[in-house]
Image (cartoon, rainbow, N blue to C red):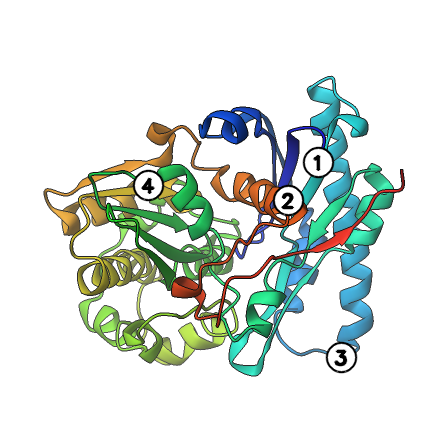
Amino acid sequence: MVGTLFIGLMSGTSLDGVDVALVDFQDATTDHLPPKVIATHYLTYPTPLRSAILALQHPTNNELETAEIIANQLARLYADAVNQLLKNSNLSAHDIVAIGCHGQTIRHRPELGFTLQIGNSALLAELTSITVIADFRSRDIAAGGQGAPLVPAFHQALFSHQHLNRAIINIGGIANITHLSASGEVFGFDSGPGNMLLDMWTKRHLDMDFDANGKWAATGSVIKPLLSTLLTEPYLAMPPPKSTGRDLFNETWLNSHLANKGYQPQDVARTLVALTAHSIYSALIELCDDVDEVYLCGGGAKNALLVSDLQALLGERKLATTDTLGIGIDWVEAVAFAWLAKQCLSRQTANLPAVTGAKGTRILGAIYQQQP
């Protein structure tokens, strides 16, 4: 494999847009140092596209054709983001080994043996003239795993410590936890809802995509009976390996707990922040109680109210962000998919059976090779 520059593309369950990271693995390859993030770019989803993706989260009329049309739109958006990143960096397609593209999750049903991320990677390869690696989750599911979370292997490579037990918590639409033991053992799982329920509630009542810094939720009060009821969701008590998404934590799920209750919207928003904090904390205490340090990444790390709730629950345990470990909170997952692309082309395994439940390690990803 010639060259050390990779691009990672991540569009997560928050459905806000696409994160793009240009990553140099030269030092990581030769000196076992962290990869260097050369440049980043973010492209917001146009409102009609975001609405169309949201509509696809549940069965709808003519959804197969609709999904393919949206996949093409996503590929063009991804290509625009990549090409703008290259332009900003004064680089060309020939400088890049490959793109690692997560795609947009439409269904995640490991219990039924499948997961679906769309984005037409073949078209993305054509539009960028760069090799694309995608569909990272399917091979792990085929091997009996959850197909998620995939980033713990990357977290292990970058963030583990010889003497400290660490937890890396990505709070996107869903919150997921990676436990990095000083002994070298790693496990991870989706703890439950991250931002998606609060985002949905904010959109419904304020017509805004998210509650910036938790300011609206901070005007409300936690509804303790509602919080207690939400925390009885069976998924939250399931042992790992486990993963989840909008298939469970969605508007229907929330509405089923709110029917005819007459709660004030800002109080529900405050309770949803508390739900995320408490579900994360409960998972940490039950499964990762030896953790010395907790590091946050993802959009939820910007929510001051959520971070404050977590710190109050964690007490004396150190709480910081991955910025202090060398990768900004917005870019950890994009860099992870650049790493996953490198692992695939190097014929190196990238899943952790202890995390996903797969019956063994596997090389992940489908390759859409650029023509020589």
In the depicted view, which residue is nearer to us: 366 or 45? 366
The residues bearing labels 1 and 2 have C-alpha atoms spaced at a distance of 7 Å
Q: Amino acid at mark 3?
A: Asn
As drawn, which residue projects farthest toward the left? Answer: 316
Image spot of residue 97 (x, y percent): 72, 35
Q: Tell me the SS state at disc 3.
A: loop
Dot label at residue 61? 3
In the depicted view, which residue is nearer to us: 177 or 163? 163
Q: Amino acid at mark 4?
A: Ser
**Looking at the image, is mark 1 or mark 3 earlier in the sequence?**
1
Q: Amino acid at mark 2?
A: Ser
The residues bearing labels 4 and 1 have C-alpha atoms spaced at a distance of 27 Å
In the rendered image, the quadrant that contains the N terminus is top right
Answer left or right for 167 relative to 42: left
In the depicted view, which residue is nearer to us: 130 or 272? 130
Answer left or right for 32 relative to 322: right
The part of the image, by quadrant, that contains residue 311 is top left
Q: Nearer the viewer, mark 2 or mark 3?
A: 2
**Disc 4, disc 3: CB below 8 Å?**
no
Dot label at residue 179? none
Q: Tell me the SS state at disc 4.
A: loop
